[in-house]
């Protein structure tokens, strides 16, 4: 099953050693190429889903399956919000309710305004009918087609998602959870207290069954089952395509590390809202399907337990795993509505057989909530990744892949880095009067700094002297109190981080902020986020332009990884969290390079590296500079500073105490007193 | 009653309700302050504790509305019930932490919160399947006393709620600000890593937070039972949700925030019900919560800005 | 589409289902049994009430089985649960699935349930299509049996949704008449518990009360999961009505009874059949419950000589007092058993169509008097009896028969 998740394009990148191992154990299956294998599995699954009602003609079980499909659709939607974007939504049932009542109101006897000429065009479109009313005059009967309402409900729910998300998505995860929980409480209350539209607690009457080519779906469960299969299939494809697109990567970057995502050019608010809207749209369409199938709705159907159960389903199946959440939802829902009673009967039989009294009377059905609670706890303690984990097994490395080839003399070739060598000279980045304070503590005071084009500037200073704060202020992660930062003639103070990146400034982090549960390749591709253009439509329809863009991005990412010789390339499909410390630093640099910057801010790039690795990286940085990149680096190792920097800036207690050529600064009295005097490392 | 009189009476009602929410909210805030975890199990620790309190009183032969005590007998039996309920609830909290949350320490994301939802379901269903779904006629040994203060009636029960809440909150304040363990808790809440390096036994601090939070929930549960003469397996959800909202409103992680938040939610509930309609109570509460968070993202007494940094 | 589906169905039923049905059919012939379906929400918030309803029905079925079955048939029970963890209570979607389960099993000739009208709305069309009659002991929403919605709720034509309880259309309005005529109430405050039953009852009461010139000072909702009703209490105290009327079940009722006690002492307090039962007596206790009026949609049970032994048996067997719906469920089972007996006695095969017709023509003596149904399936006997809780310390305080004092009949609207 895990193979199904993989994009076909990524399959060939699998190193051979892993599959060689499998050839020995599973000769038949393994000889089929992975790409074909995954298609085959999906095909078989689809066939099984289509044949099920024919093989098992039990209306009740088909009905159970259709309900389970509705929950699979909900799980897919919540998976986008929680699994992809990492936003905990505890009120997801609200969107389900909105979709349900949207169709409920548009295709039932509930709303019957008086007939007037206003309704003529709608009548002509067959959206409403004209019926004799109880009070004499004619009334409007809404009969909007189910098929039309599916997208409308989805859009309506998405709209509510955006309206609701806009003010709250800035909140931290836990706060968001409470606010969404509140929204989940409010919607059923509103439904109950607006009987004119919803018939309140009494429940809707006469919601119309869908029709197709004049044939009404009526009461039999089978046509609804097929609609459910179609809906879930559509949502699976949507989920998979989004996941493997630029959008999906942006979501997962936000999930893994919001700050790093923003610094890599991801507009957090926009992508969170998008996740919320798409998740809500899934629930809205599902609500319409559900209420059409049931032909009634009451507010009790959309309360907190529904939100929690959908969450249980995705946790059980595997948060973030598209196939996992579908399986999780189907299993749990059918367990309670279909298997559990059989299981109880079976236990009673067993009890009679072996004459155990409690077995004869045990009713599993009433303990289902207890069982779900236990499942939730046990899964969290022992199998957090769920039944079908979202992350793929890592390909094993061969011996020569493991042996690092040390490169000397910088990067061999740099065609992938194209920092638009500019004929201009003068300053690229000009900082003046920059002051940052946290509460009473002044982290930077009136710092000024000029970085010439194609130059290398090193920022040094003791710990806590404000070096990283300087980077954070430049990249928009902290807002300075005063001062100006001009990048290529443009003031960038006040810009959000993703806009700063778009101006051509990319950075690495001192304390490493990779996206730990994404692969090395994905990490680097997220660096390209701002340089790619494709949106949701392109991703969903797999437009040729989008596919080409993805393919090029992928190739370029691999080429950037290849800069580091065999250190990263064999590990392209490994999770970033599995890398060694030095390789993580290299990946961060690769990720920053991927954004195609003109100015690179490196925060202690060689920290934690041994002398050989340090030397190697220093030479690589030098070659980046030679190819035209302007570089500012924070560094503690003096030999690196001396070998790379044209100019050194010394910070102490947030103030610039010296600047100049490395040799000059090294001999500056104040620097020695402030810095060297306290640090034996600078020797 | 005049309009003002009614509003004042609703304020009295709201303060009683709010005192209970505050006690319950402290449990959320203590755990959150240290583990950054919203503990959904707390909802039903409260519920289970209300049953434990009932059984403790029944053990003393006090059941239903039949026996009213006074003087020393009243103080003694209430003291016994409070000690038993708070200790038992505290132990339940500690067991939950040890069994289901400690193995998850250090695992980021939502794992801890989802586990507590599971634990909450388990507690809920254990009571449902063993005790049943009926409403319990809670023992009520308190004599009925009422004082007419102007247009407002204040009952002995309400005075008891306020007194017990004040004593417990003052005790908590002294514990947190004066004792070694309390200081360690505050330090851990500020910066767990630094506290660990300074030799704070973080496990002990976490256990203490769970014990104290759950014990306060136990006290709230017993007060709840005595005040409404009622308990049932369903009481955890609404009370817990209100208290959690109170904690967030006050700034989750902040103990004074939880106290003020609890009282505010109590007042919003009664005054909102009076001035608008009881049917819209939850809508009013959550609308105010969203508004507060939009303008004061950290809650009223929150320390850090609630965006990840 | 239609033809393809028809082929699909006929193919599959011939190839697969047929085998099982055939096997089952042979089995049936051997020991001559029929099945009664019971569909109630045993999971979640309504589990307690569902259990009491089931116990009532099972008492009648067990009595019949102990007497050697009905008309030569052994009575089997198919017990289904329409409560789910997903909904946390009754779940209309599961109710629909269960309706299909019952319809799909040919041995099921009639059913008891559902408890909730929300489930009933989802089940009714399916049961109608399958020709399976169900008798609900507790679902009171008038829509389901309203001829106006016949196309929706009984596309099969004949009534299949029978009730041994009257709809909201009678209990609330009749009590409003009783308020006006007997209690001389001039002003009232109306409450409901936000559930379908409570809202329906309270709305029907309110409409009739207004018609009778009673001043309705307000109508608000109690959240059944909330414990604190002091806000509402204070509000009512300020408005100072002659009476309050509560539409809802015991869950919120117990708390209302407790918290309304002696803060608003001189107010007449009344409710529907949700306030009639051991749950109120046990949960609220005395003296809080003293003086409350309650109605049941049946003649005075006390006058029925069968009532005392029923309650005695019930308490002995299940260890708790029956509630009002235990009685209507017992009666529903009596009606079904009687129908099976009559079909068997007529020499016809006991099929669900025959049983449905027999139920339609019932004249069965039950705890609530003679039960018969109109063409829509509603019970014809629409007597609403009024009781007042009056403490009788010679009996246990949760003894429904002796703590509720019969005070008369609530008159129907003319």
Image (tube, coloured by chain):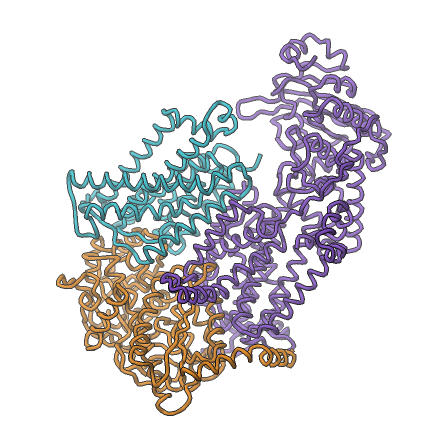
Q: From the viewer's perspective, is residue A240 above or below residue A574?
A: below
Image coords of residue C318 (percent x, y)? 28, 65
Colour assigned to chain C in the rendering is orange
**Residue B2 at x, y = what percent?**
26, 49
Between A140 and A650, the residue placed more toward the observer is A650
Specify the quadrant that holds the N terminus of chain A.
bottom right
Answer yes or no: is residue B260 visible.
no
Q: Nearer the viewer, residue A138 or C348?
A: C348
Q: Colour of chain B?
A: cyan
In this picture, is B124 found above or below C347?
A: above
* Rendered residue at 61%/31% (across/down): A478
In this view, the residue farthest toward the front is: A354
Side (left or right) of B155 relative to A228: left
Image x and y of residue A232, in percent: 62, 62
Question: Quick check: can you spot residue C177?
Answer: yes
The C terminus of chain A sits in image quarter: top right
Number of numbered labels in the structure image: 0
Say which residue appears at 58% left-offset and 72% top-offset.
A56
Residue A520 place in picture, x, y as percent: 71, 40
Query: Outermost residue, left direction?
Result: C394
Picture residue at 33% right of the left edge, 77% below the top: C333
Q: Residue lying at the far bottom in this picture: please name it.
A: C347
Compare residues C42 and A547 and report the one nearer the observer.
Answer: C42
Q: Residue furthest top?
A: A669
Q: Is residue C249 left or right of residue A136?
A: left
Q: Colour of chain A?
A: purple
């Amino acid at each position: 099953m895990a193979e199904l998740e993989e994009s076909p394009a990524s399959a060939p990148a699998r190193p051979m050693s892993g599959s060689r191992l499998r050839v020995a154990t599973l000769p038949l299956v393994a000889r089929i190429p992975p790409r074909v294998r995954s298609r085959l599995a999906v095909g078989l699954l689809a066939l099984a889903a289509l044949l099920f009602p024919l093989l098992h003609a039990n209306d009740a079980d088909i009905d159970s399956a259709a309900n389970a499909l509705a929950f699979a659709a909900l799980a897919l939607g919540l998976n986008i919000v929680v699994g992809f974007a990492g936003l905990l939504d505890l009120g997801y049932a609200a969107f389900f309710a909105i979709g349900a009542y949207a169709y409920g109101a548009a295709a039932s006897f509930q709303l019957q305004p008086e007939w007037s000429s206003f309704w003529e065009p709608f009548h002509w479109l067959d959206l409403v009918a004209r019926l004799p009313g109880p009070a004499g005059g004619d009334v409007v009967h809404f009969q909007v087609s189910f098929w039309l309402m599916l997208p409308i409900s989805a859009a309506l729910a998405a709209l509510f998602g955006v309206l609701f998300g806009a003010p709250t998505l800035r909140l931290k995860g836990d706060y968001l959870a409470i606010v969404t929980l509140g929204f989940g409480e409010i919607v059923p209350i509103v439904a109950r207290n607006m009987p004119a539209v919803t018939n309140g607690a009494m429940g809707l009457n006469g919601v119309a069954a869908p029709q197709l080519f004049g044939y009404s779906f009526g009461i039999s469960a089978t046509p609804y089952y097929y609609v459910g299969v179609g809906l879930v299939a559509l949502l699976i494809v949507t989920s998979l395509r989004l996941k493997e697109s630029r959008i999906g990567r942006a979501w997962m970057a936000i999930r893994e590390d919001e700050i790093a995502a923003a610094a890599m050019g991801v507009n957090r608010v926009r992508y969170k809202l998008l996740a919320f809207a798409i998740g809500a749209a899934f629930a809205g369409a599902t609500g319409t399907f559900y209420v059409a199938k049931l032909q009634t709705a009451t507010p009790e159907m959309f309360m907190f337990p529904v939100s929690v159960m959908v969450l249980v389903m995705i946790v059980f199946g595997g948060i973030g795993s598209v196939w996992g959440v579908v399986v999780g939802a189907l299993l749990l829902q059918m367990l309670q509505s279909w298997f559990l009673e059989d299981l109880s009967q079976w236990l009673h039989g067993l009890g009679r057989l072996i004459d155990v009294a409690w077995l004869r009377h045990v009713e599993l059905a009433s303990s289902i909530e207890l069982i779900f609670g236990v499942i939730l706890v046990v899964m969290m303690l022992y199998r957090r990744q769920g039944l079908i984990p979202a992350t793929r097994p890592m390909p094993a490395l061969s011996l020569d892949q493991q042996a690092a080839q040390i490169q000397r003399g910088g990067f061999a070739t740099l065609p992938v880095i194209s920092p638009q060598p500019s004929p201009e000279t003068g300053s690229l980045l000009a900082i003046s009067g920059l002051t940052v304070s946290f509460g009473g503590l002044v982290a930077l005071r009136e710092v000024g700094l000029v970085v010439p084009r194609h130059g290398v500037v090193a920022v040094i200073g003791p710990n806590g002297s404000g070096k990283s704060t300087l980077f954070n202020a430049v990249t928009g992660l902290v807002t300075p109190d005063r001062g100006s930062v001009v990048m290529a003639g443009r003031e960038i103070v006040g810009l959000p981080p993703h806009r700063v990146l778009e101006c051509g400034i990319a950075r690495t982090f001192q304390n490493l902020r990779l996206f730990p549960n994404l692969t090395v390749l994905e990490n680097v591709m997220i660096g390209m986020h701002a340089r790619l253009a494709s949106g949701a439509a392109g991703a969903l329809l797999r437009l040729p332009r989008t596919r080409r863009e993805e393919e090029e991005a992928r190739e370029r990412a691999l080429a950037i990884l290849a800069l580091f010789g065999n250190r990263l390339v064999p590990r392209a499909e490994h999770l970033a969290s599995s890398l060694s410390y030095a390789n993580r630093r290299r990946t961060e640099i690769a990720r920053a390079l991927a954004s195609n910057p003109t100015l690179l801010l490196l925060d202690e790039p060689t920290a934690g590296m041994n002398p050989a690795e340090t030397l190697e990286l220093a030479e690589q940085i030098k070659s980046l500079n030679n190819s035209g990149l302007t570089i500012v680096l924070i560094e503690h190792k003096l030999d690196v500073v001396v070998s790379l920097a044209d100019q050194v800036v010394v910070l102490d207690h947030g103030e610039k105490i010296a600047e100049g050529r490395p040799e000059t600064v090294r001999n500056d009295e104040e620097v020695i007193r402030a810095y060297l005097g306290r640090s034996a490392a600078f020797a | 009653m005049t309009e003002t009189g009614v509003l004042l009476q609703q304020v009295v009602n709201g303060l009683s309700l709010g005192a209970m929410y505050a006690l319950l909210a402290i449990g959320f805030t203590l755990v959150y302050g240290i583990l950054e975890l919203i503990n959904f199990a707390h909802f039903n620790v409260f519920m289970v504790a209300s049953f434990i309190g009932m059984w403790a009183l029944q053990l003393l032969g006090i059941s239903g509305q039949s026996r009213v005590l006074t003087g020393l007998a009243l103080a003694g039996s209430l003291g016994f019930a409070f000690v038993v309920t708070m200790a038992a609830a505290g132990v339940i909290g500690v067991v939950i932490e040890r069994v289901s949350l400690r193995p998850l320490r250090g695992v980021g994301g939502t794992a801890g919160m989802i586990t507590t939802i599971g634990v909450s379901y388990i507690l809920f269903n254990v009571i449902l399947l063993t005790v049943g779904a009926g409403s319990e006629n809670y023992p009520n040994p308190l004599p009925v006393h009422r004082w007419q203060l102007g247009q407002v009636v204040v009952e002995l029960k309400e005075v008891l709620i306020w007194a017990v809440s004040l004593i417990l909150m003052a005790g908590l304040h002294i514990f947190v600000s004066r004792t070694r363990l309390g200081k360690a808790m505050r330090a851990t809440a500020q910066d767990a890593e630094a506290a660990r390096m300074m030799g704070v036994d973080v496990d002990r601090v976490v256990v203490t937070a769970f014990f104290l939070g759950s014990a306060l929930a136990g006290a709230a549960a017993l007060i709840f039972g005595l005040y409404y003469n009622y308990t049932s397996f369903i009481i955890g959800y609404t009370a817990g949700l209100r208290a959690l909202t109170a904690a967030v409103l006050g700034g989750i992680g902040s103990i004074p925030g939880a106290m003020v938040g609890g009282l505010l939610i109590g007042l919003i509930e009664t005054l909102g019900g009076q001035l608008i309609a009881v049917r819209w109570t939850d809508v009013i509460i959550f609308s105010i919560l969203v508004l507060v968070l939009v303008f004061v993202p950290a809650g009223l007494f929150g320390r850090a800005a609630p965006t990840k940094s | 589409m239609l033809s393809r589906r028809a082929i699909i169905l006929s193919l599959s039923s011939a190839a697969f289902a047929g085998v099982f049905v055939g096997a089952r059919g042979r089995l049936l012939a051997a020991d001559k049994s029929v099945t009664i379906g019971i569909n109630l929400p045993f999971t979640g918030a309504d589990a307690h009430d569902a259990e009491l309803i089931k116990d009532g029905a099972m008492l009648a079925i067990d009595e019949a089985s102990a007497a050697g079955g009905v008309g030569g048939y052994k009575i089997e029970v198919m017990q289904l649960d329409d409560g789910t963890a997903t909904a946390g209570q009754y779940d209309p979607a599961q109710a629909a699935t269960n309706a299909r389960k019952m319809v799909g099993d040919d041995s099921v000739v009639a059913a008891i349930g559902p408890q909730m009208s929300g489930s009933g709305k989802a089940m009714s069309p399916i049961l109608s299509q399958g020709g399976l009659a169900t008798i609900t002991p507790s679902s009171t929403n008038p829509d389901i049996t309203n001829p106006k919605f016949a196309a929706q709720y009984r596309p099969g034509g004949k009534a299949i949704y029978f009730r041994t309880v009257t709809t909201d259309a009678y209990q609330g309005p009749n009590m409003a008449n009783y308020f006006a005529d007997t209690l001389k109430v001039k002003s009232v405050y109306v409450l409901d518990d936000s559930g379908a039953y409570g809202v329906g009852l309270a709305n029907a009461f309110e409409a009739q009360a207004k018609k009778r010139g009673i001043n309705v000072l307000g109508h608000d909702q109690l959240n059944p999961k909330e414990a604190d009703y002091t806000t509402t209490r204070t509000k009512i105290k300020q408005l100072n009505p002659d009476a309050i009327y509560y539409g809802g079940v015991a869950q919120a009722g117990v708390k209302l009874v407790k918290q309304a006690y002696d803060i608003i002492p001189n107010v007449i307090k009344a409710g529907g059949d949700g306030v009639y039962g051991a749950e109120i007596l046990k949960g609220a206790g005395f003296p809080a419950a003293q003086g409350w009026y309650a109605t049941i949609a049946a003649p005075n049970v006390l006058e029925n000589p069968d009532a005392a032994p029923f309650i005695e048996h019930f308490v002995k067997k299940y260890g708790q007092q029956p509630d009002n719906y235990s009685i209507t469920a017992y009666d529903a089972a009596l009606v079904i058993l009687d129908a099976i007996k009559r079909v068997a006695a007529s020499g016809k095969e006991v099929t669900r169509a025959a049983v449905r017709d027999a139920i339609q023509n019932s004249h069965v003596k039950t705890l609530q008097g003679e039960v018969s149904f109109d063409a829509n399936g509603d019970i014809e006997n629409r007597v609403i009896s009024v009781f007042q809780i009056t403490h009788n310390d010679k009996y246990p305080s949760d003894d429904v028969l002796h703590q509720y004092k019969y005070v008369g009949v609530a008159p129907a609207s003319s």
